[in-house]
Image (tube, helix red, strand yellow):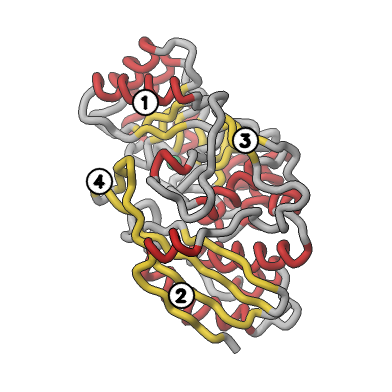
């Protein structure tokens, strides 16, 4: 298999549920899709970078530039292309994991479609459905938060994750716990605290949280280890875990008891699987995070989340949570809070779904076609 032609598409998709980033409330999702044409057929990749740096250093325009100028030429030079060879060809360029994951995802999709193998089977998935949780942003009031959470529980989500930050932490968590004593509850701080906040964070121990996600800065593994010794609530790392190597270090240091895996954050699904394997070897449970992906990214995430070590509910939402119309057939959640993993026989292999050309064109703001040599 060899890369022949690549289409980079920018989409502008209005969000049904506003999404808070470090820079404010987003009402739209700016998305970059990559369609790779190879000598054996095509495949799709989706870039999870946000328009501005914030969650991490990468941002969408930067990722598009790196893909176009550096990653595609490296991958196009590979004669017998496989997902692993695509990743190896890009490894010489430091950083830019979300850009690399986009290219790897498309190559993997094309390679698997050509072989009639699903993403889930290729990665080593063992389950046909994934348990889904909901991530709830900072609300304008506790009353509004409780109403929102009640709606999600009614829809069937298997656990509730509350975003917290200084000034919005113990009170909202307490209120949700008191209103919903049995709900599986966790909190995500997106690196908003310092070790000096340990006493405040320890107050969360009273609410039976499954985990406290990324309380401190991404680089602060040692401080996370210190904090873990002061809290009863297990610490989960998200932003900190950029590779299997870092995951191994974090586990060895006692910096986390749980890991959130996002393929985009770690450079692709192959590295995501290695992190799963490292964690499984240490009996550290993992779960699949989300970055407001379209059905394409969600399909790949569902495949990843079907691996045996993914024993906690995923941040994989049905399409209707964020998009009036997804680019793919809608990802649908059952009333039991589970979403089927695309795949199985007769789906054509790869991601197991294809964007609707009309819906795709409706959202597309720019298409760049790159002949690759
Ligand atoms: Mg997180």
Q: Is mark 2 within 8 Å of ligand 1?
A: no
Q: CA distance from mark 4 to mark 1?
A: 25 Å
Residue 191, how many percent across, how many down? 37, 42
Dot 2 falls on a residue whose secondary structure is: helix
Residue drawn at (38%, 70%), measured in percent from left and top? 62
Task: Say if 21 sits above or below 271 in the image.
Answer: above
| Viewer-side residue, 218 vs 79 | 79
| Comes first in the chain, label 3 or label 2 | 2
Q: CA distance from mark 3 to mark 1?
A: 30 Å
Q: Residue at x 59, y 36 (%)?
A: 339
Under tag 3, what secondary structure?
strand
On residue 66, the disc is 2
Report which residue position mark 3 lands on: 130
Rounded to the nearest angstrom, the CA distance separating label 4 from label 2 is: 27 Å
Sequence-wise first label, 3 or 1: 3
Q: How many marks?
A: 4
In this view, 117 is above or below 201 = below
Please state which of the two labelled residues, at mark 3 or mark 2, is closer to the viewer: 3
Determine whether 30 is above or below 62 in the image. Answer: above
Q: Percent x, y for residue 190?
A: 38, 41
Whether residue 313 is visible here, answered yes or no, is yes
Q: Mark number for residue 201?
A: 1
Check whether the beta carbons of the residues at disc 3 and disc 1 lie within 8 A of each other: no
- Residue 25: mark: 4
């Amino acid at each position: 298999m060899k890369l022949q032609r690549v289409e980079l598409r920018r989409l502008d998709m209005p969000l049904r549920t506003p999404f808070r980033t470090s820079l404010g409330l987003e009402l739209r999702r700016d998305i970059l899709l990559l369609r790779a044409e190879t000598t054996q057929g095509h495949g799709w990749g989706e870039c999870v970078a946000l328009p501005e740096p914030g969650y991490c250093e990468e941002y969408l325009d930067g990722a598009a530039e790196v893909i176009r100028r550096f990653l595609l030429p490296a991958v196009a030079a590979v004669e017998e292309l496989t997902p692993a060879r695509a990743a190896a060809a890009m490894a010489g360029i430091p950083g830019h994991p979300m850009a690399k994951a986009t290219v790897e995802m498309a190559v993997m999709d094309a390679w698997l479609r050509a072989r009639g193998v699903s993403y889930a089977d290729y990665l080593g998935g063992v389950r046909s459905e994934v348990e889904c949780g909901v991530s709830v942003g900072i609300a304008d009031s506790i009353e509004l938060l409780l109403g929102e959470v009640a709606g999600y529980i009614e829809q069937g989500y298997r656990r509730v994750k509350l975003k917290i930050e200084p000034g919005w932490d113990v009170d909202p968590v307490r209120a949700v716990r008191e209103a919903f004593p049995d709900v599986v509850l966790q909190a995500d701080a997106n690196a908003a605290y310092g070790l000096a906040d340990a006493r405040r964070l320890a107050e969360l121990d009273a609410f039976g949280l499954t985990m406290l996600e990324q309380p401190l800065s991404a680089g602060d593994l040692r401080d996370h280890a210190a904090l873990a010794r002061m809290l009863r609530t297990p610490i989960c790392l998200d932003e900190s875990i950029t590779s299997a190597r870092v995951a191994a270090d974090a586990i060895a240091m006692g910096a986390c008891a749980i890991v959130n895996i996002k393929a985009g954050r770690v450079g692709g699904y192959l590295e995501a699987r290695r992190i799963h394997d490292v964690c499984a070897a240490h009996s550290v449970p993992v779960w699949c995070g989300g970055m407001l992906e379209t059905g394409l990214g969600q399909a790949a995430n569902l495949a990843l989340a079907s691996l045996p070590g993914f024993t906690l509910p995923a941040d994989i939402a049905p399409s209707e949570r964020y998009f009036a119309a997804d680019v793919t057939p809608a990802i649908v959640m059952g009333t039991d809070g589970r979403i089927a993993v695309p795949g199985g026989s007769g789906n054509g292999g790869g991601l197991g779904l294809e964007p609707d050309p009309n819906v795709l064109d409706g959202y597309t703001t720019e298409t760049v076609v790159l002949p690759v040599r």
